[in-house]
Image (cartoon, rainbow, N blue to C red):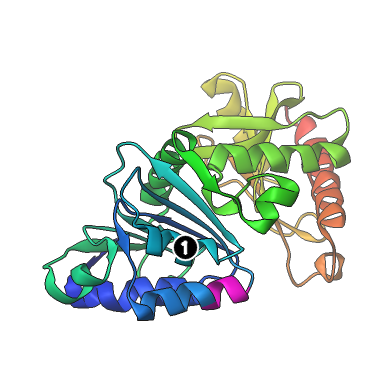
């Protein structure tokens, strides 16, 4: 659920968003004339190594402002012919509102906006769907923009920002990592809109497997057969049937899920490859168990 911001709240949250940025910051505003306070926060972010991308409206940046921004070596500067959006985005927060990065606006205008949070449930609830939609629009705006100044990192390695990657793009990268461990069991992004999961269709004959923070198994049989399998499995069901895992299947219309038993030593101090190997072993044990009822 979004948090409403008035002028005072925007004047609190925009600087806070910049201050709390750890790695990457995106600012899209048509007009820029930074106050001393905001520019100081941008300088401090630059000194921390924050990679900043700033998009403004073409021909709307005064030379003194352009010269100030040019001094920030970790800043990518773009201009866009028609941008009128105002947004501020980092790893935790997204602010969408009416306020430009403009000192006059801070002091004189009546402004409104909303704050959404991805990873800060103590402040406001998860706004994942809206943020994913916003990321798609941010990508569209940046793609249609013209590069005016490259950051030091962009010059060396090319332009890439983790925080504007879509859910599908992230899952594509995840699939590459998974496929190194699962070899011939090929995972690919499956989903739509903002919901994607690394999925191997026919991991075993007519059993699809999706891998998230857990393994999710789905039979590709008709409903009657799945119900028959469920009834057979129910007699042997136990949450801790597999050592090191927690196994759930509550209804024949629901997915079968396999979680880590986080208290088990096999999950302690493991790297990502070892974690995937553990999941592969658990999935294979689970399928071996299920086969006797199919």
Vertical relation: 281 (above or below) 140: below
Secondary structure beneath label 1: helix
Kindly identify the residue that appears in the image at 59 percent across and 30 percent down. 190
Give the residues in magenta: 44-48
Q: Main secondary structure of the magenta part?
A: helix
The residue lying toward the viewer, choosing from 244 and 49, is: 49
Kindly identify the residue that appears in the image at 12 percent across and 68 percent down. 109
Q: Quadrant of the N terminus?
A: bottom left
| Left or right for 85, reference 108 | right
Q: How many marks?
A: 1
The residue lying toward the viewer, choosing from 82 and 175, is: 82
Kindly identify the residue that appears in the image at 11 percent across and 68 percent down. 110
Dot 1 surroundings within 10 Å: few (below 14), some, or many (20 or more)?
few
Q: Tell me if residue 231 is in the magenta stretch.
A: no
According to the picture, the residue beneath numbered tag 1 turns out to be: 67
Quarter of the figure with residue 86: bottom left
The percent position of residue 152, horizontal first and vertical second, equals: 67, 57
| Left or right for 255, reference 127 | right
The residue lying toward the viewer, choosing from 82 and 5, is: 82
The residue lying toward the viewer, choosing from 16 and 32, is: 32
Quarter of the figure with residue 262: bottom right
Kindly identify the residue that appears in the image at 38 percent across and 46 percent down. 134
| Left or right for 70, reference 259 | left
Residue 122 seen in render: no
The percent position of residue 288, horizontal first and vertical second, equals: 83, 37
Vertical relation: 67 (above or below) 224: below
The percent position of residue 294, horizontal first and vertical second, equals: 72, 26
Quarter of the figure with residue 256: top right
Vertical relation: 2 (above or below) 59: below
| Left or right for 97, reference 141 | left
The percent position of residue 193, horizontal first and vertical second, equals: 44, 33
Give the farthest residue toward the top. 222
């Amino acid at each position: 659920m979004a948090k409403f911001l008035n002028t005072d709240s925007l004047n609190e949250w925009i600087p806070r968003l910049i201050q709390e940025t750890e790695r990457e910051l995106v600012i899209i505003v048509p007009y820029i004339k930074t106050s001393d306070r905001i520019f100081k926060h941008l300088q401090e972010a630059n000194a921390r190594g924050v990679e900043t991308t700033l998009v403004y409206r073409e021909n709307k940046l005064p030379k003194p402002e352009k010269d100030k921004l040019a001094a920030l070596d970790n800043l990518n500067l773009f201009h866009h012919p028609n941008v009128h959006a105002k947004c501020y985005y980092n790893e935790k927060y997204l602010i969408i509102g009416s306020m430009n990065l403009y000192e006059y606006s801070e002091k004189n205008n009546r402004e409104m906006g909303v704050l959404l949070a991805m990873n800060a449930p103590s402040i406001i609830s998860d706004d994942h769907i809206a943020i994913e939609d916003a990321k798609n629009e941010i990508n569209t705006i940046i793609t249609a923009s013209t590069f005016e100044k490259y950051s030091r990192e962009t010059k060396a390695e090319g332009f890439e920002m983790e925080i504007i990657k879509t859910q599908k793009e992230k899952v594509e990268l995840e699939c590459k990592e998974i496929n190194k461990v699962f070899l011939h069991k090929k995972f690919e992004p499956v989903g739509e809109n903002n919901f994607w999961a690394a999925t191997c269709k026919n991991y075993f004959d007519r059993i699809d497997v999706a891998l998230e923070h857990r393994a999710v198994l789905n039979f590709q049989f008709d409903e009657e057969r799945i119900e028959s399998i469920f009834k057979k499995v129910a007699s042997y069901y136990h949450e801790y049937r597999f050592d090191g895992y927690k196994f759930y299947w509550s209804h024949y219309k629901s997915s079968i899920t396999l979680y880590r038993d986080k208290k088990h030593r096999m999950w302690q101090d493991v790297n990502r490859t070892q974690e995937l190997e553990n999941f592969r072993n658990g999935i294979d044990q689970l399928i071996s168990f299920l086969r006797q009822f199919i």
